Amino acid sequence: MYEVAGKSISDILSIDYNTFNILGLSDMRKVVGRLVSAGNKRIRRFENANESSPALNQVYRSGGAFSTKGKNLNQLRSEFARAKNFLEAKTSTRKGWRAFKKETIEGLKKKGVNITEKQFDKVWQSYEKLKEISPEVSNRGLKYAVLKDISDMTIDDDINADDIVSRLQSDINDIYERNEGLNYDAGVSGFFEIE
């Protein structure tokens, strides 16, 4: 029998593999129940603040809010893994999400992409949607050029992420040609040239 009372979420998340595998349905329900409660509190904090984050979006894509209701042992194990991934993600808290935004904005400035915190959410949403449709935008040769174009478009407050994605989707080849080779090592491309 695994005692959940008095254990922190961190203790539960670091449960050793052997102990985890011998938990019965009742104990697993208690363990997962604690994680479900903690995870759903974080989700509600984001929802109440009308915010989102990559970790939260992943939860929505993988089935929504956490639950133990009506789940068998294997389903509870899956829910444990889903909750663990969320709770351990840096962007699963509003504080972590704000820190991530700040770090990302600073990192993008170093790459010549200047965005404000006000623009960040729209830039992030647009880039993530565009990446789903056209995965090649995450290629080193395109990533910062695409982010720069997105940031330029987000200056217009009336434009939404879907409009940005539809505009850029047709321009991917032009963006690549305009920025071809900027982020590649010249030695590698020179290696493949025929002399």
Image (cartoon, rainbow, N blue to C red):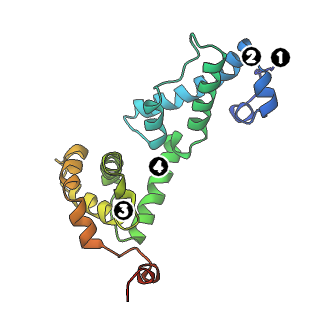
- Viewer-side label of 3, 1: 3
Kind of residue at badge 3: Lys
Up/down of 110 relative to 162, above or below: below
Which quarter of the figure has residue 155?
Answer: bottom left
Q: Circles 1 and 2: CB distance less than 8 Å?
A: yes
Q: Position of residue 148 (x, y in %)?
A: 29, 64
Which quadrant does the N terminus fall into?
Answer: top right
Q: Residue 143's mark?
A: 3
Q: CA distance from mark 1 to mark 2?
A: 7 Å
Classed neighbour count for the residue bearing mark 1: other residues with Cα under 10 Å, few (<14), some (14–19), many (≥20):
few
Crowd class of label 3 (few under 14; some 14 to 19; many from 20; radius 10 Å): some
| Residue hosting label 1 | 1
Q: Residue furthest bottom?
A: 195
Sequence-wise, which precedes: disc 3 or disc 1? 1
| Name of the residue lying farthest toward the front | 195
Residue on which the image places disc 2 = 27
In the displayed structure image, the side of residue 7 where residue 138 appears, left or right = left
Which mark is on residue 98?
4
